[in-house]
Image (spheres, rainbow, N blue to C red):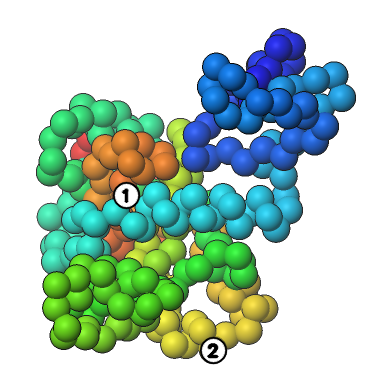
Amino acid sequence: MTCWDNESILLAQSWMPRETVIFASDVRINFDKFRNCMTATVISKTIITTNPDIPEANILLNFIRENKETNVLDDEIDSYFKESINLSTIVDVYTVEQLKGKALKNEGKADPSYGILYAYISTLNIDDETTKVVRNRCSSCGYIVNEASNMCTTCNKNSLDFKSVFLSFHVLIDLTDHTGTLHSCSLTGSVAEETLGCTVHEFLAMTDEQKTALKWQFLLERSKIYLKFVLSHRARSGLKISVLSCKLADPTEASRNLSGQKHV
């Protein structure tokens, strides 16, 4: 889409690839010989709405997030079966800003970093019908299976041996503190069950009202969160973050650590 006027140019500069959904009406559509495709041009009648609150936009944004965050075969699978990390060995306390800085310093390193964050869960879409928070996973490798075939493309690629599947949480949450927000952090498997205090089957049996009530037990409440994080250009926010543990924080402990930041 081509923008000529200063107002639309400034607006477009705020758009983020794979993060922003736009609704544009009254744009001029022409065939661009140079690009060899159809293109849109902003005109005086054009009205652009960024991230409109409509079902189609929400579905599109969730589709982008899910495909970026869940369809990559990488070491995130460890957290699906609850990664065997001794949480007592994780002592470094970060703010969101410090965590991002730590990840940038480790750019190019394959090994992830670990830390503790005292933050609020600012997004927890477990009662949104357009967001899938329960997925079928392969019982052998743990990867998300194709919903159409219900078959794992990893394990069954060169084998006739059908692998069974199981239901598992896969929730993408945002974590916020006074320095910023971490988007699309993975809260999965048994860690999600422990955090939410229910199994997948118990969750599926809940009404929408019960799911909303469950969400508000955690939303905007300060939590103590153990994280595994690594810089990843394939992730929406530039960071691939897995939640290893998430529980409501003790106010005194949180205040002491946030004021001191002694471990960083």
Query: Relative to residue 216, is residue 173 depicted above or below?
Result: above
Q: Is residue 194 above or below residue 118?
A: below
Asked if labels 2 and 1 touch by Cβ distance under 8 angstroms, the answer is no
* 1 or 2: tag closer to the N-terminus: 2
Decide which of 64, 119 is in the foreground and name it.
64
Q: Which residue is mark 1?
A: 241
Residue 135, image x, y percentages: 40, 73
Disc 1 from disc 2: Cα separation: 29 Å
- The residue lying at 19 percent from left, 71 percent from top is 157
**Of 80 and 165, the residue lying toward us:** 165
Q: Is residue 163 left or right of residue 100?
A: left
Q: What residue did someone put label 2 on? A: 205
Quadrant showing the C terminus: top left
Labels in figure, total: 2
Say what amino acid the circle numbered 1 marks.
Answer: Ile
Residue 224 is at least partly visible in this image: no
| Rendered image: mark on residue 73 | none
**Which residue is located at x 19 percent, y 63 percent?**
78
- Say which of 140 and 211 sits in front: 140
Q: Dividing the image into 4 quarters, which one contains the N terminus?
A: top right
